[in-house]
Image: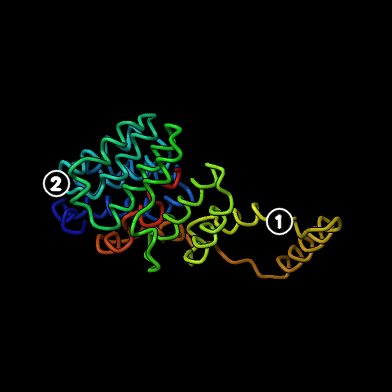
Amino acid sequence: MHQELMSLPKTLAEDVAQNLVMVARLIDEEPEQAYAYSRIALRLASRVAAVREAAGFAAYATQKYSEALAEFRAARRMTGHVELWPVMADCERGMGRPERALEMAGAPEVQKLDKAGQVEMRLVAAGARRDLGQLDAAIVTLQSPELASNSVQPWTPRLRYAYADALLAAGREDEAREWFAKALESDKDGATDASDRLAEMDGVDFVDALDEDGDDDADIADEREAEYAADEPDSAPDEDDDRADVDVDVEAADDLVVDVEDDKGPADKA
């Protein structure tokens, strides 16, 4: 991406980089705001592939699948790369076209994907099968050497989770529980809610720890906080605070704007 932005005039490159940084920072927690920043970057530099890709992921995060697919296609035309193929297929699912997603799962482009991309494509294909009500086919689609392997890879928790979820949907509860447990065991970063699913299957209810007096305790805490605040000397606001998060250069953007599907893969809604 750094090299792509360097093709722009310096001031323009910095403006685009700042917006892409904000997309990367906000896409998980505030996807609508990330989308707004992506539109600004797109307006400034629509001929930069990294901008089109970021705009695609921002649109995808806000479930604007048709728009996301158009941006991914544009980025792919510019670069000739196939890495976006699985998420493009998942956009077809989002648009209500699971048959098209399955066609893409059988396309020659899949063979050009790395192992992570092929696993993502398998997850998308299984999701498409479920969209069509083909639960047994979805289960078979997920059965693979990657699923059977004891080696834990970045995709392992989501692959095991998708398999457990498909088993549960098919009424195979004992097997589903086993695979939710395996998903949890491999999920060190909390990429799935396998622990909640296990608790639900085991009939464990999580209750609010706040008792009946909790509101009173909260009121007391608020009063004490107000007292402490009254004792603190006033400080003048920093006029530069609002600029602090966006005063970055192109190199910073190159570090921060990472491939967002690392955190949210295409099959998250499977």
Query: Who is closer to the viewer here, 253 or 60?
Result: 60
Q: CA distance from mark 2 to mark 1?
A: 50 Å
Relative to residue 249, is residue 41 depicted above or below? above
Dot 1 corresponds to which residue?
Answer: 204
Image side of residue 121 versus residue 131, left or right: left
User: Could you tell whether 217 is left or right of 78 in the image?
Assistant: right
The image quadrant where one finds the N terminus is: bottom left
Answer with the quarter of the image where residue 215 lies.
Answer: bottom right
Q: Residue at x 19, y 54 (%)?
A: 5
Secondary element at tag 1: loop
Identity of the amino acid at label 1? Val
Decide if residue 150 is on the left or right side of residue 234.
left
Asked which colour scheme the image uses, the reply is rainbow
Assign the C terminus to one quadrant of the image.
top left
Residue corresponding to mark 2: 80
In terms of depth relative to the viewer, which is nearer, 188 or 230?
188
* Residue 86 x/y as whole percent: 30, 45
Name the mark nearer the viewer: 2 or 1: 1
Of residues 31 and 83, the one nearer the viewer is: 83
The kind of residue on which mark 2 rests is Gly
Q: Position of residue 177 (x, y in %)?
A: 57, 56
Mark 2, secondary structure of its residue: loop
Residue drawn where x is 46% and y is 39% of the image: 135
**The image quarter in which residue 73 lies:** top left
Q: Is residue 244 above or below residue 53?
A: below
Q: Position of residue 151 (x, y in %)?
A: 38, 69
Q: Nearer the viewer, residue 224 or 20?
A: 20
